[in-house]
Image (cartoon, rainbow, N blue to C red):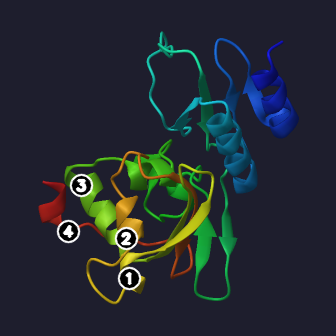
Amino acid sequence: MNSAILDLENAAGTSLIQREPYPVIAPNRWELIAEIIRIALSRQQKVLVFGSGSSFDTQFALLRDNVIAITTSKLAGVTAQGNSSFAAGPGTLLPEIISNGDFYAGRTLGGFLASNLAGCERELRRILRQHLSAIEIIDGSGGMRRLPAPSQSTTAYSSGAEQIIGSNGRSGIITRIEFSLKPPIRIELDRKSVV
């Protein structure tokens, strides 16, 4: 057994859900993601991040060695923060936080915020963005960063969260999303945005 797998097994424990052909880790806390990234950096390995909503073909395989995959699917759930706000993990399903979100069954909050969207989905994300207060990420060096959302910024261009929204995960791994109101969020799309 190579030492890279031993290091991962020691760090990840039961979160290591696949060893071959490449390791896949499903951490349930952000500290483990940060530790896995630091291990990958020390061994010059690449990190592939995906959520439970990722749609890989059944024949999907990484075409390179030296890769560690991290899924954020276990970072799920909603927690109240006082009387007028809540936080959710990136693996939280959209219907858990949106009162009329059944159309988005199977879609996760992290993937929805990080994806390039069009049409009605883009409008829904715009409305969700208005209620964001912060997004927490793990950056490429394994450091935690808390990025203010557009609603918390003093200028239109000072929001750190804007770097993450629509980035397809290139700017960091989303670990927590904070909203400035209580769930479920009621979203009404006007007819123009649906057409």
Q: Is residue 70 visible?
A: yes
Q: Secondary structure at mark 3?
A: helix
Residue at 40% x, 58% y: name it. 164
Q: Secondary structure at mark 1?
A: helix
Of labels 2 and 3, the one closer to you: 2
**Three-letter amino acid code of the residue under disc 3:** Cys
Disc number placed over residue 129 in the picture, else none: 2
Query: Of callouts 4 and 2, which one flags the residue occurring earlier in the amino acid sequence?
Result: 2
Disc number placed over residue 120 in the picture, else none: 3
Where does the image place residue 46, in percent across and percent down from the top left? Answer: 54, 31
**Three-letter amino acid code of the residue under disc 1:** Ser
Query: Of callouts 3 and 1, which one flags the residue occurring earlier in the amino acid sequence?
Result: 3
Residue at 47% x, 45% y: name it. 107
Residue at 84% x, 25% y: name it. 6
**Three-letter amino acid code of the residue under disc 4:** Asp
**Three-letter amino acid code of the residue under disc 2:** Arg
Q: Are marks 1 and 2 in contact (CB under 8 Å)?
A: yes
Where does the image place residue 113, in percent across and percent down from the top left? Answer: 41, 56
Of labels 3 and 4, the one closer to you: 3
Residue identified by numbered label 4? 190
Residue identified by numbered label 1? 151
Determine the CA span between mark 2 and mark 3.
14 Å
Query: Of callouts 2 and 3, which one flags the residue occurring earlier in the amino acid sequence?
Result: 3
Determine the CA span between mark 3 and mark 1.
21 Å
Of labels 4 and 2, the one closer to you: 2
